[in-house]
Amino acid sequence: MLVVAGSVGKTGAAILAATAALRTGAGLVTVATPAPALPMIAAGRAEIMTEPLPVDAGGALEAGAVTRALALAKDRDAVVLGPGLGTEAGPRAFVRDFVRRCPSPLLVDADGLNALAPSAKERGATDALRRSAPTVVTPHPGEMARLVGSSSGEVQRRRLETASAFAMETGAVVVLKGQRTLVADPDGRAAVNPTGNPGMATGGTGDVLSGIAGALLARGCDAWTASTAAVYLHGLAGDQAAARLGQESLLAGDVVSHLSRAFRILERARA
């Protein structure tokens, strides 16, 4: 599995996503990241492999970064794109080109979604999501609003309608995060997740969800199954962490460390 993520000052997002993927059963996880960010990510978790992406003199991803990332993605079972990648012009162009050309099952989150959001002067930026390979997007309400040219308030008022319409328009499975995360697919299916708690509204938990869903894609789940299972596992791990630590003290890393408990609960339920 490949995680294309991180930048200087945002290395934690890549580490959280990759670690969550490992905890969800992804056998091998490589993080492709801008070269200046690589040492921090490599030091953050011994089990994570790393690959540098070339940058220009200013530290921004250069044109050759797409070629390198696509070569890394070629034989991967799934790719997670976006956590902590940055919102500058370099990452924005990189994301749009990569999404169009990536042949693998793909999950786009965070700065990846911001890069796809159309500006006031353009249309069709989200056309790149119309891919033949399985595709999942995991926006929070603000990112969803930017993708559809609306407001967060309007997205919250019309969560089901917004997520379903975007799924049908792009062909991607949409995971609209928030209280009772909603999953919608291009065929009109929708599901509301029953697990999770307010303590999970903290930085990095979205990166954890991306890693979980990406790992399930890599393990062979279709986009709908990977998405619905991931949000349930993510919320269940968060509930286990909150029961031990309290919602007020919950950190994204606590969700990762409680994934094993969530899996054990599901295993007992199946027995």
Image: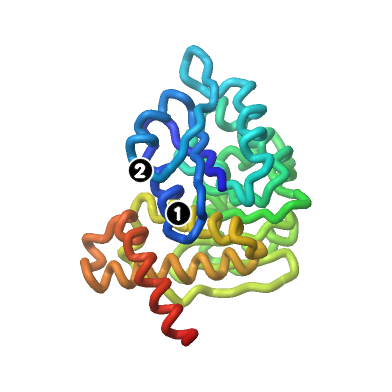
Quarter where residue 102 is shown: top right
Q: Vertically, is 270 above or below 1?
A: below
Residue 13 location in percent, x, y?
41, 44
Q: Specify whether 73 is left or right of 13.
A: right
Name, please, the residue furthest toward the top: 57
Up-down relation of residue 99 to residue 161 (above or below): above
* Residue in the foreground of this view, choosing between 262 and 227: 262
Residue holding disc 2: 45
Q: Residue at x 72, y 71 (%)?
A: 188
Q: Is 116 placed left or right of 29 in the picture?
A: right
Q: CA distance from mark 1 to mark 2?
A: 11 Å
Rendered image: mark on residue 22? 1
Residue type, mark 1 in image: Leu
Q: Position of residue 200 (x, y in %)?
A: 35, 62
Q: Are marks 1 and 2 in contact (CB under 8 Å)?
A: yes
Element under disc 2:
loop
Which residue is drawn at the image coordinates 42% and 83% (left, top)? 268
Q: Quarter-wise, where is residue 122 in the image?
A: top right
